[in-house]
Image (cartoon, rainbow, N blue to C red):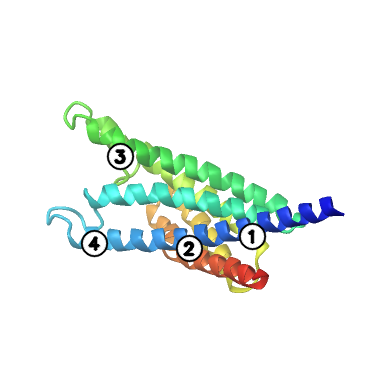
């Protein structure tokens, strides 16, 4: 009897930890998304006059790339919490969503870390070709190709699957984010990069709202146990 009670206490503590990690990682993703948009807008407004409208330059570009790595970490943590929080019948979906989220994080973190480190230490004259391939400002480049694969395909699939755990507005926003990302994947696949704006709408604007709803979901769960 005592052993059963101890197991029950440990299980409840584990569930509370999962809810708190889920809430804070969802909130963190929302905050990072909001900061990213703010820095991006500031970078556009303060860009050198000779640059294109959407061209980002340092220090704003470096900050944006660092924020992308941070957001990848918070999203993987969120997917871990969703998987552990999901009903047993849905865990095959959340486990797959977590797997896709890990692939997404590895891809986007790798290319942006390479851009932050390697690209900024290359000789612009001797290594112009390599610098271009590590750039996200033009198409086609290897870095941009891998980044779009991460944000459009793998993140899109992850959110579409994770949405199945929820209902109502939370499910609607997660699903919308996922499908917008997947629709944007038609851009690099077809070579018509204008389609990529669908994915940008998904992860740039819908994703922070979706994560805010997920955070509220976990907050309600925490309130019920208090």
Residue 72, image x, y percentages: 46, 49
Q: Residues within 10 Å of mark 4 (few under 14, many from 20)?
A: few
Tell me what residue is drawn at x 51 percent, y 53 percent: 75
| Quarter of the picture holding the N terminus | bottom right
Q: CA distance from mark 4 to mark 2?
A: 23 Å
Residue identified by numbered label 1 = 16
Residue identified by numbered label 4 = 42
Which of pointers 3 and 1 lies earlier in the amino acid sequence? 1
Residue identified by numbered label 2 = 27
The answer to whether residue 210 is above or below residue 21 is below
Which of pointers 3 and 2 lies earlier in the amino acid sequence? 2
- Asked which quadrant contains residue 28, the reply is bottom left
| Quarter of the picture holding the C terminus | bottom right
Q: Nearer the viewer, mark 3 or mark 1?
A: 1
Asked if residue 151 shows in the view, the reply is no
Disc marking residue 116: 3
Q: Nearer the viewer, mark 1 or mark 4?
A: 1
């Amino acid at each position: 009897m005592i052993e059963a009670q101890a197991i029950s206490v440990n299980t409840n503590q584990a569930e509370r930890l999962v809810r708190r990690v889920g809430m804070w990682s969802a909130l963190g993703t929302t905050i990072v998304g909001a900061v990213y948009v703010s820095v991006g807008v500031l970078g556009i407004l303060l860009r050198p006059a000779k640059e294109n409208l959407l061209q980002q330059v340092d220090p704003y570009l470096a900050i944006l790339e660092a924020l992308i790595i941070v957001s990848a970490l918070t999203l993987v943590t969120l997917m871990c919490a969703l998987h552990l929080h999901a009903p047993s019948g849905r865990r095959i979906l959340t486990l797959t969503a977590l797997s896709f989220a890990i692939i997404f994080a590895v891809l986007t973190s790798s290319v942006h870390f390479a851009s932050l480190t390697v690209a900024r230490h290359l000789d612009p004259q001797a290594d112009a070709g390599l610098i271009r391939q590590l750039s996200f400002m033009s198409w086609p480049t290897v870095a941009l190709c891998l980044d779009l694969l991460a944000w459009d395909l793998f993140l899109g699939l992850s959110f579409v699957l994770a949405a199945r755990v929820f209902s109502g507005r939370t499910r609607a926003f997660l699903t919308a984010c996922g499908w917008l990302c997947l629709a944007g994947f038609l851009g690099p696949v077809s070579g018509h990069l204008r389609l990529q704006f669908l994915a940008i709408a998904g992860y740039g604007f819908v994703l922070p709202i979706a994560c805010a709803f997920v955070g509220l979901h976990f907050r309600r769960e925490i309130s019920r146990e208090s």
